Image: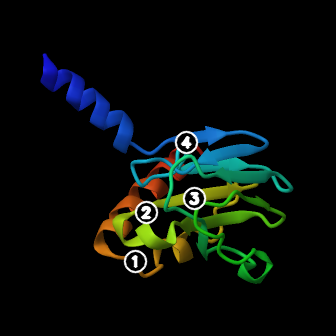
C-alpha cells in the first residue's frame, strides 16, 4: 500500500510539468526544481519567478537573442522577464544546474532553435532532464 503512494508521489514530483498561459508564475521549490518546467507563452508575455524556497535563481543558458535577456537573477530574489522574440529558451538555477534544475520557455510556439538548445553542454544529469523537457515541449506544440 505504501509503495503505491510513494510511487505516485515520486511520479508527480519528478515528471516534467507543462502549462500554456499568457503570463506565468513559476516558484523555486524545495525539491531543487521549478514548479513549472515547460512553459508555452505568446510573444510579449511575461514569466515571473518567485522564491518560495531558498538557494535558487534564474540563469539563461541558451535562447534566441541572448543579448536581450537580463543577467542572472540574484539568489532568493523575484525575477521577471518579458519575452519579445519567438523561440525556445533554456534556463536553470546556477547552484543546481548540474543537478538538473532546468526549465524551458517556448515563445510563440516556435521551435526553430530546439536543436541548438539540445546541443548545449550540460552535466549528464542535466542533459537527461533537458531531454525529458524537450520531449514534453514537442508533445505540447502545435
Of pointers 3 and 2, the one earlier in the residue sequence: 3
Q: Is residue 140 left or right of residue 95?
A: right
Q: Is residue 82 left or right of residue 122?
A: right
Query: Where is mark 4, residue-wise?
Result: 18
Q: Is residue 142 visible?
A: no
Query: Where is mark 1, residue-wise?
Result: 122
Instruction: Check residue 104 in the rendering and tell me which mark sits there, or answer none.
Output: 3
Compared with residue 35, is residue 73 higher up or lower down, i.e. above or below? below
How many C-alpha atoms fall within 10 Å of the one at disc 1: few (<14), some, or many (≥20)?
some
Quote the CA–CA distance across marks 1 and 4.
22 Å
Of pointers 1 and 2, the one earlier in the residue sequence: 1
Q: Is residue 28 left or right of residue 132?
A: right
The quadrant of the picture occupied by the N terminus is top left
Q: Is residue 103 left or right of residue 30?
A: right
The quadrant of the picture occupied by the C terminus is top right
Taking depth in this image into account, of 79 and 116 the one nearest to the observer is: 79
Amino acid at each position: 500500500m505504501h509503495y503505491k503512494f510513494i510511487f505516485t508521489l515520486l511520479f508527480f514530483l519528478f515528471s516534467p510539468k507543462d502549462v500554456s498561459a499568457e503570463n506565468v508564475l513559476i516558484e523555486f521549490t524545495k525539491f531543487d526544481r521549478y514548479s513549472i518546467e515547460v512553459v508555452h507563452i505568446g510573444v510579449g508575455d511575461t514569466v515571473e519567478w518567485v522564491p518560495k524556497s531558498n538557494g535558487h535563481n534564474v540563469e539563461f543558458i541558451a535562447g534566441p537573442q541572448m543579448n536581450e535577456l537580463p543577467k542572472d537573477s540574484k539568489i532568493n530574489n523575484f525575477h521577471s522577464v518579458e519575452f519579445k522574440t519567438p523561440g525556445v529558451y533554456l534556463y536553470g538555477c546556477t547552484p543546481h544546474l548540474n543537478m538538473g534544475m532546468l526549465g524551458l520557455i517556448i515563445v510563440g510556439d516556435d521551435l526553430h532553435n530546439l536543436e541548438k538548445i539540445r546541443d548545449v553542454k550540460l552535466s549528464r544529469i542535466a542533459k537527461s532532464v533537458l531531454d525529458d523537457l524537450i520531449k514534453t515541449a514537442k508533445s505540447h506544440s502545435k
